[in-house]
Image (cartoon, coloured by chain):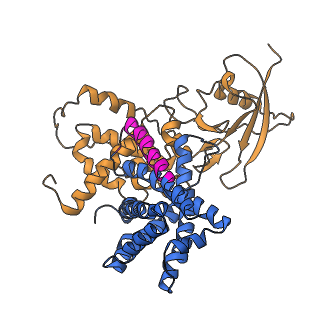
Amino acid sequence: MAGSRSFNTRRLHSLLGVIPVGLFLLEHLVVNYFATKGAASFDNAADFMGNLPFRYILEAVVIFIPLYFHAIYGLYITFTAKNNTSRYGYFRNWMYLLQRVTGVITLIYVSWHVWETRIAAAFGAEVNYQMMADILSSPFMVAFYLIGVLSAVFHFSNGLWSFFVSWGLTVSPRSQRISTYVTMGVFVALAIVSVRTIFAFI
Amino acid sequence: MSDKTIKFLITRQDTPETAPYEEEFELEYRANMNVISALMEIRRSPVNAKGEATTPVTWEMNCLEEVCGACSMVINGKPRQACTALIDKLEQPIRLAPMKTFPVVRDLAVDRSRMFDALKRVKAWIPIDGTYDLGPGPRMPETKRQWAYELSKCMTCGVCLEACPNVNSKSDFIGPAPLSQVRLFNAHPTGEMNKEERLNALMEDGGLASCGNSQNCVQSCPKGIPLTTSIAALNRATTFQAFKNFFGSDRV
């Protein structure tokens, strides 16, 4: 096998964060945005997604296996770091710290979110507009969802930046700087989409 | 003679095993001092700020012109060379501490062996030894020589490892400096003939992939070496190398 196990695992971690987990995140945010067009519109879209053929295989291969591999290996990476932003307060060092912090928040949030929606669905609950409206009727859960979703979106956007570096797509300082602007633009755009979606349920 | 003084707070440690402690020193101000000349002053009369006789502070030095890397230490929170740390430009009290990323030998002297071992690990040299004269090697384009020269300024001082959040006791990351040396030797027209060996060494455990892109290294390097450009360039090179290793290649 090419390289060592840790080289391959780390590269796989980087790849899976974007394909398929990042793509799934985009799909999820887009479909949820139907909530801004009313309950019926959201239920229709949720129903379409929930009744896709090969649903269980798609869920496992596109979502759960890569997501939890990325999350658990990511936790390991997080705990091998010794953060030093107090001594080296450079922009990229802060982004490095934020990437790890938002990763951990996202893992906690996503696990809870899966429990509350997908696992609940497996036990017979129906995933629809009303379900989300009920969850978001508590101000605590609104805060939890806002923090969780914004963390996920930031982690994805900034993760795209490091994905481009890790695979050697952006090499020069200028390309990395432009990549910072582009990925932060992605963050702002996705943040608007996700916050609007959350408030559509309230 | 002026009555101005310079205050030092020095983190000291008597042996590699004993606990570190702080000691304060106060010196008479002289114009144009640097941290090294101040430490020499302390060595000449090792008396701390309380007026007690103490042991002279141990540190390493060699070239005194920021090309050897031996006098690296943490000065007012930033790792840098003591020889180019001018007293007039430092906030007082001046805090000196060893670069704790490395094993402390005594006081400010640390053991940077891991960096020299790393250079051996990644084969940071050009193998030209043989039993007969191979003649001149291929020529290097001038534009390439110019950027490669910047990489060759690395003095193995250890500042980038000290600044890196991924070089610590929980991680086996080799650190930025030896990575950039692979780019240097792979850029050399003769060194290029062995580039696969070096790239494969970088793909071992604790190699290139352990970089987390905090980019502290490039901000901290006293020689201004474009370390993160080297890392990204090597990321690209190892991407291709990984595919070649796995699938084989028309250019073995």
Q: Position of residue B130 (x, y in %)?
A: 21, 43
Task: Identify which residue, A64 or B77, lies in the foreground.
Answer: A64
Q: Where is residue B27 in the image (x, y as percent from the top left)?
A: 78, 26
In the picture, measured across the screen, residue A179 lies left or right of residue B104, that is left
Q: Residue at x 67, y 64 (%)?
A: A139
Q: What residue span does the magenta drawing correspond to?
A: A170-192
Q: Residue at x 52, y 56 (%)?
A: A196
For residue B129, say whether it is visible: no
Above-or-below relation of A111 to B126: below
Q: What predominant SS class does the magenta segment belong to?
A: helix
> Which residue appears farthest toward the top when viewing the image?
B1
Task: Identify which residue, A184 or B83, lies in the foreground.
Answer: A184
Above-or-below relation of A37 to A127: above
Count every numbered label the image shows and give the total.
0
Above-or-below relation of A172 to A108: above
Q: Who's orange, chain-wise?
A: B
Q: Residue at x 53, y 66 (%)?
A: A107
Q: Who's blue, chain-wise?
A: A
- Any magenta on residue A107? no
Q: Which residue is drawn at 31% across and 55% down?
A: B200
For residue A116, say whether it is visible: yes
